[in-house]
Amino acid sequence: MESSYKIELRNITKDFAGVRALDDVSIQVRPGTVHTLVGENGAGKSTLMKVLNGLYIPNKGTILIDGKETVFRNPIDARNKGIAMIYQELNYFSELSIEENIFMGKYPDGISRWNINWKKVRNRTLELLKSEGLDYDPSMKIKNLSVSEIQMLEIVKAISFNASVVIMDEPTSAITLKETELLFQKIEDMKKRGISILYISHKMDEIFKISDDITVLRDGKTISSGAASDYTTDSLISQMVGRTISNVYPKETVPIGEEILRVEHLSSDGLFEDINLTLHKGEIVGLAGLVGAGRTELARVLAGFDPISSGKVMLDGKTIRIRGIDSSIRQGIIMLSEDRREYGIVGVRDILENTTLADHCVNKDKFAGSKKQVSRARKLIQDLNVKTPGLDVEIQNLSGGNQQKVVLAKWLMLDTKVMILDEPTRGIDVGAKYEIYKIIINLAKQGCAIILISSEIPELIGMADRMYVMCKGRITGRLERSEFSQELTMKYAVGGAQT
């Protein structure tokens, strides 16, 4: 009898080092539908999809494709059965070209680099890029692309498999609204061709926009599963976190202190120009704008990653020189990068090492792993509710959201005057977001000045005291809290006149 489901996962259980990541989880995916998995970080969503993709072998349970029991020993087995996965952590070779990355492991007409039909590879790459509306040179190295551009190429790579099942783990976490709409159009096209999409997201608006069915996971267990129409935002959040979150943005009135940072006519060649802004103790200043507006570039200059071409930076009323990352950190300016894998974590090191790394580097006279460091690190990990059996776990084994919490803990180990948070809640579930918002508020209460960069305008409206909006490397809008609105923010983000 032919199955009415494309994919069935029955009673999947998976353990890691004595920790049960999946506990008797079952889902059923219909052909030509979007089946969305939701849950807090650490709920088991990505782990379950890695089981389906052949990356993990379950301790017990059954995988069925078109009603037939299937065993995957590795991702190649899964790919040969028509399953492709776009990982939350982008998988790419930065020194190789776009065409090499797209066709890595599946080159036509050859089994090694030396007898590949490169003309065919080039033509096929151009076809794929054109079909996705992307105008890139196939020979360009991946390292020269932005995070959002690499994310779009990962989507192209998955689609190139001609898969009947495509797993998308937070695919819109680093792409623009325009690129997101392009992705959703592609998903609709795939559904019409009978392709099933397993989708992981924390964004409520897109969950209800594209989902046909939803499964909620919590603590490695299936909480519920059904048609998207059976859920509301409130009911979904309640099932995800096991409690009701009445206020998504826990904004509090915090006394604003004296000016701590002033930027005057700051420029960096080819990145941004003539930036003027101020920041006060206890203040959360939002930095809004579309991808490519220059927000991250400004943050990188203030954090010492890139050089200043002209202008000046004043801290506590005195002009400072930022000679590099170490210089910036020592003067009390730190940055949490949007690219966690590249700049935030050392994947093969444990949580303790990642948490204490900055403290040890800045205070070189301190003994690494001292009782004081361990005690403080353990408290921060507990305060941030990082889901881990211990500090000796390699950080690469944590979920993306828990990795982000460890990165935040690393910077909280230091005495910081100005903290620049670049997309700090990207790819993090609503419960974990709430916890990080509370940490941000507590930092402000302690007198820390915060620059909050976010592509989610509601997040900035919910958390910021003031807001600057950037477009094409310039500040186009300055808004007080009483003036906040999505419409006005977007107007400045697309190049509206300066206030």
Image (cartoon, rainbow, N blue to C red):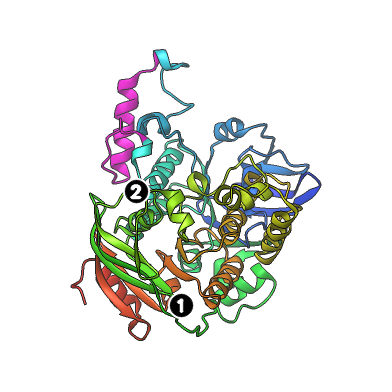
Question: Could you tell me which residue is drawn at 57 percent across and 51 percent down?
Answer: 358
- Give whichever of 346, 35 is nearer the camera: 346
Q: Which residue range is magenta in the image?
A: 115-141
Q: How crowded is mark 1: few (under 14 residues within 10 Å), some or many (20 or more)?
A: some
Q: Where is residue 73 in the image (x, y as percent from the top left)?
A: 67, 31
Tell me, yes or no, whether the two marked residues, 1 and 2, touch with CB atoms within 8 Å.
no
Residue at (23%, 50%) from the top-left corner?
269
The percent coordinates of residue 30 (x first, y second) are: 57, 53
Image: 438 above or below 116: below
Residue identified by numbered label 2: 306
- Residue 114: give x, y in percent of width and height: 41, 13
In the depicted view, which residue is nearer to us: 354 or 479? Answer: 354
Residue identified by numbered label 1: 462
| Residue sticking out furthest to the left | 497
> Viewed as shown, does residue 419 lie left or right of 216?
left
Residue at 58 percent across and 30 percent down: it is: 76
In the image, is 422 to the left or to the right of 129? Answer: right
| Image quadrant where residue 401 sits | bottom right
In this view of the protein, which residue sits in the foreground, 276 or 153?
276
* 345 and 268: which is toward the camera: 268
User: Is residue 473 visible to the viewer in this orientation of the structure?
Assistant: yes
Identity of the amino acid at label 2?
Asp
Quadrant (top left, top right, bottom left, bottom right) of the N terminus: top right
Quadrant position of the C terminus in the picture: bottom left
Q: Is mark 2 on a helix, strand or loop?
A: loop
The stretch drawn in magenta includes residue 117: yes
Amino acid type of disc 1?
Answer: Gly
Q: Which residue lies furthest to the top in this view?
A: 115
Instruction: Give the label, 1 or 2, closer to the camera.
Output: 2
* Residue farthest right in this picture: 18
Helix, strand or loop at label 1? It is helix
Up the image or down, 9 lies above or below 39; here it is above
